[in-house]
């Protein structure tokens, strides 16, 4: 195995991937610090075993797996996350920087999406994964990934329409 | 262009929050720790007892496989066809004072796992027909060194054919 610490590519890759990975991890973890812990562990594990950054599906699958383990590890935390991920709680999901007034309703609508739709949307929009990569990361078919993405867009459009 | 292209563009305008500056340093430190672990793992001299002896392992697995096959054949045989399945010679007792540093025969086990009656057979030069019975067995010989406690065991399959005179009635 290459010497990972002196393998300088990670210093190029990580800043590029980190915001999207954090956004992805924040779907399960309310605390930004927890999400950063998960991203750190996932990236280090990924980089140790697979230097091929083209395999983004594996990187996201690693983040997802570690995030879910993180949630399960503490039952109190798990209850809190389950409560937070309910439809009424909202605000567990993606966190964005410097929202203006026109963007706030859209960010809120994204937060309120069901988790299975939201994770596909996050990977597709902000991480620019293909449906094939999303399907690999989530262990679902490409058709399922595409339909969840479409359902998410339909739900967002509906929630943004004036009542 | 699909119906959602405008919505997708609006979504892309939302920028994910950047990670904290410490995260980059933490990842760098973690990767450095991994390197140290790898280097220290490379320097560990592992005791000989933890190394796998592949030849012994292979022989052991082969012996286990043979025993499993024999056991399966034995299970599948109807009970009424099973002759006396095994014989064991008594372990010879070493005479007092006769212990020396040699392997001496310590036992013989014969397991009959199949018997087939092949019917009447007319052997050359004999007027009387003979019934031919074929036995398939598994025999084990064992030697033991009383001085060192070492033992040697050899197992092999064998086949015996027995001709039984048939009396005419």
Image (cartoon, coloured by chain):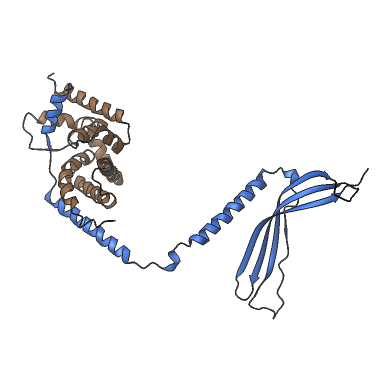
Chain colours: A brown, B blue
Q: Looking at the image, which residue is at 36% across and 68% down?
A: B45
Q: Looking at the image, which residue is at 29% across and 60% down?
A: B38
Q: How many marks?
A: 0
**Residue at the limit of the structure toward the top, as seen here:** A163
Residue B60 sits above or below residue A13 on the image: below
Residue A148 sits above or below residue B74 on the image: above
Q: Is residue B10 left or right of residue B45?
A: left
**Residue at the limit of the structure toward the front, as seen here:** B124
Residue A76 sits above or below residue B89 on the image: above
Q: Is residue B77 left or right of residue A67?
A: right
Residue B16 point in image, percent of width and height: 14, 39
Q: Is residue B58 left or right of residue B18?
A: right
Q: Of B70 and B147, which appears nearest the observer?
A: B70
Q: Of A54 and A150, which appears nearest the observer?
A: A54
Q: Of A116 and A61, which appears nearest the observer?
A: A61
Q: Looking at the image, which residue is at 15% across and 49% down?
A: A12
The quarter of the image holding the C terminus of chain A is: top left
**Residue at the limit of the structure toward the right, as seen here:** B169
Residue B163 point in image, percent of width and height: 82, 51
Residue B98 point in image, percent of width and height: 70, 79
The quarter of the image holding the N terminus of chain A is: bottom left
């Amino acid at each position: 195995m290459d010497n990972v610490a002196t393998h300088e590519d990670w210093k190029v890759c990580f800043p590029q991937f980190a915001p999207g990975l954090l956004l992805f991890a924040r779907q399960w973890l309310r605390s930004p610090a927890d999400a950063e812990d998960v991203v750190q562990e996932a990236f280090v594990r990924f980089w140790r075993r697979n230097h091929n950054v083209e395999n983004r599906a594996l990187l996201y699958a690693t983040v997802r797996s570690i995030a879910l383990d993180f949630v399960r590890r503490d039952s109190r935390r798990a209850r809190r996350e389950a409560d937070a991920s309910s439809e009424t709680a909202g605000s567990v999901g993606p966190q964005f920087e410097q929202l203006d007034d026109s963007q706030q309703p859209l960010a809120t609508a994204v937060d309120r999406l069901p988790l299975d739709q939201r994770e596909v949307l996050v990977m597709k929009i902000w991480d620019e994964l293909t449906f094939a990569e999303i399907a690999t990361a989530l262990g679902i078919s490409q058709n399922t990934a595409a339909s969840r993405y479409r359902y998410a867009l339909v739900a967002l459009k509906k929630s943004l329409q004036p009542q | 262009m699909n119906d959602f292209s405008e919505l997708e563009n609006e979504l892309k305008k939302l920028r994910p929050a950047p990670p904290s500056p410490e995260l980059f340093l933490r990842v760098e430190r973690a990767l450095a720790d991994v390197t140290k672990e790898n280097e220290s793992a490379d320097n560990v001299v592992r005791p000989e007892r933890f190394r796998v002896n592949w030849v012994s392992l292979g022989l052991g697995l082969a012996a286990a496989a043979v025993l499993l096959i024999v056991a399966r054949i034995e299970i599948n045989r109807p009970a009424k066809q099973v002759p006396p399945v095994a014989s064991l010679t008594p372990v010879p007792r070493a005479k007092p004072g006769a212990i020396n540093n040699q392997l001496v025969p310590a036992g013989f086990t014969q397991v009959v796992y199949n018997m087939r009656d092949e019917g009447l057979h007319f052997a050359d030069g004999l007027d009387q027909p003979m019934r031919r019975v074929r036995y398939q067995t598994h025999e084990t010989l064992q030697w033991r060194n009383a001085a060192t406690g070492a033992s040697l065991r050899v197992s092999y399959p064998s086949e015996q054919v027995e001709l039984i005179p048939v009396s005419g009635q």
